[in-house]
Image (cartoon, grey):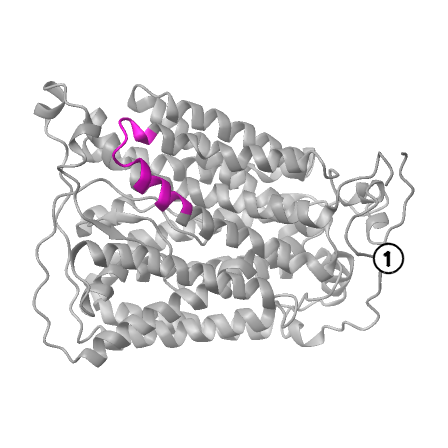
Amino acid sequence: MAMGRAPPALPLCASVSLLGGLTFGYELAVISGALLPLQLDFGLSCSEQELLVGSLLLGALLASLVGGIPIDRYGRKRAILGSNLVLLAGSLSLGLARSLPWLVLGRSAAGFAISLSSMACCIYVSELVGPRHRGVLVALYEVGITVGILLSYALNYALASVPRGWRHMFGWAMAPAVLQSLGLLLLPAGADETAAHRDLLLLQRGEATQLGPERPRYTFLDLFRARDNMRGRTAVGLGLVLLQQLTGQPNVLCYASTVFRSVGFRGGSSAVLASVGLGAVKVAATLMAVGLVDRVGRRALLLAGCALMALSVSGLGLVSFAVPVDSGPSCLALPNATRQAGLRGSDLLQDSAPPTEPRAGGDPPEPALSASKKAKSRPAGRDVPTPAPPALSTPATPRPLSQPAALRWAALVCMMAFVSAFSFGFGPVTWLVLSEIYPVEVRGRAFAFCNSFNWATNLLVSLSFLDLIGAIGLSWTFLFYGLTAVLGLGFIYLVVPETKGQSLAEIDQQFQKSRLTLCFGHRQSLAGVQYSRLDVPVAS
């Protein structure tokens, strides 16, 4: 073997994608275990807890608004490395924090870092590998998210009784970021440098050479113009991210613990089963998407996932007419006497840990919230769990249930089906399609633009949830989400293209030839796709 031979690219690309998702999921979920000891150590009021939880969202929103510029200007690899540096700084700020401002600063930096990294990572991997592996490797990012969430559960549990254990919880986020950075150093900066790697993946003949200066230039405003059907591409991207949230995924799963309690799981067992159980379902469904995305195609997974979401959330709405939903009490701030007495919050954890209410499939467990607090404190995100809100008082004992057991188990099946459908459909495929449909020169800014709508729509859906329940009721709210999923089916069938097995250059040409995106998915031709290995001599 030659001494200068480059390392295999396939496992490196897979590790970059997986570790990026793992960092994203861990940072989102770690606050669920850290918030209670932070409340006790710093004597945080409800508003201060909301500020701490929401600071991650503020940083992520900022990154989605401005992150496309460094991604396109300085390259995807440098953007990921830069985001990892920001994450390291944020983790140090959190781990060494002595006051609330430092905690908020650290969480804001972490939110900015994971949002920027998520965009750059999906684009980087999609550009670096060939069409035969692109779907699998980009979808691995979603797998990493779910694994990161479950890993945060385990570490939060292990460190719950450790004095100042929350510092270790935040600090461990640096580990996957460092490993990802080391892997990136062994990979080229982009597709135009793939010729320098002898063992890179199968690329389409000529794809890497089409990224020269003769390619057309695009500005951000071109996203809304008819040139090269950029307006149609933007319609596809925005439609997917909006439907991803408007189908109610952030809110339906807030009632996961209620559904589990309704089938007989009480108290703490309900929270554990709802968080870990749904998390395991989410991982399994995402792994299924990884195995199928390059075989059955993007459209097939989106159509199947959206159809199953429509059926399951509608079924949940029908069943919820009979299954009651209990609301928890309001947020309680830590009494000042605790702080004045000089008690360490860590010392109180073993005696006073309020029961938690789990979030969405794989989402971190969180304390039960009152209606007003749920509306205020749930941040938005990509397609993944949201940090937990402020620590709360003990919820009331659930009311006796007299409904038939079949109805209660039907609610459980519907919830599981909804989590699975999102996890193999909208969850991974939306971001894969976004990384494929835009020209390389504007791909970073276009991805960031759509990502900003994802965060904003998630927040809007969360804030309007309780108002919608007050206006039409919980059951009709679920049925409304089912109707939205049906409309999403029509959108995907008529507008979203199939990009399976095509190079990025071919996808670009398909959009340029199609002035109308309507029924675009039926005009895809995979004929003539040829693969060849790039055999470029490397100095030994």
Q: Residue furthest front?
A: 1
Residue at 33 percent of width and 68 percent of height: 415
Residue at (73, 52) in percent of width and height: 129
* 419 lies left or right of 299: left
Name the magenta segment's main secondary structure. helix
Residue 256 in sight in this render: yes
In the rendered image, which residue does mark 1 sit on? 205
Q: Is residue 163 left or right of residue 245?
A: left
- Placement of 297 over or under 121, stated as above or below: below
Which three-letter amino acid code belongs to the residue tagged 1?
Arg
Q: Is residue 334 magenta?
A: no
Q: Is 38 situated above or below 355?
A: above
Left or right, residue 35 beside residue 485: left
The residue at 17%/36% (across/down) is 350
Q: What stretch of residues is rendered in magenta?
A: 151-166
Residue 182 position by quadrant: top right
Where is the C terminus found, in terms of image quarters? top right
- State which quarter of the image contains the N terminus: top right
> Is residue 234 depicted above or below 102 in this figure?
below
In the rendered image, residue 181, in percent from the top left (x then y), is placed at 61, 34
Nearer to me, 8 or 252? 8
Q: Position of residue 157 (x, y in %)?
A: 30, 42
Q: Is residue 15 left or right of residue 325?
A: right
Q: Quadrant of residue 40?
A: top left
Label 1: which secondary element? loop
Image coordinates for residue 17, horizontal then vertical, percent:
60, 47
Q: Residue 47's spot in the image, x, y percent? A: 22, 34
Residue appearing at x 50%, y 45% in the figure: 22
Q: Nearer the viewer, residue 268 or 451?
A: 268
Picture quarter containing residue 203? bottom right
Whether residue 225 is visible here, answered yes or no, is no
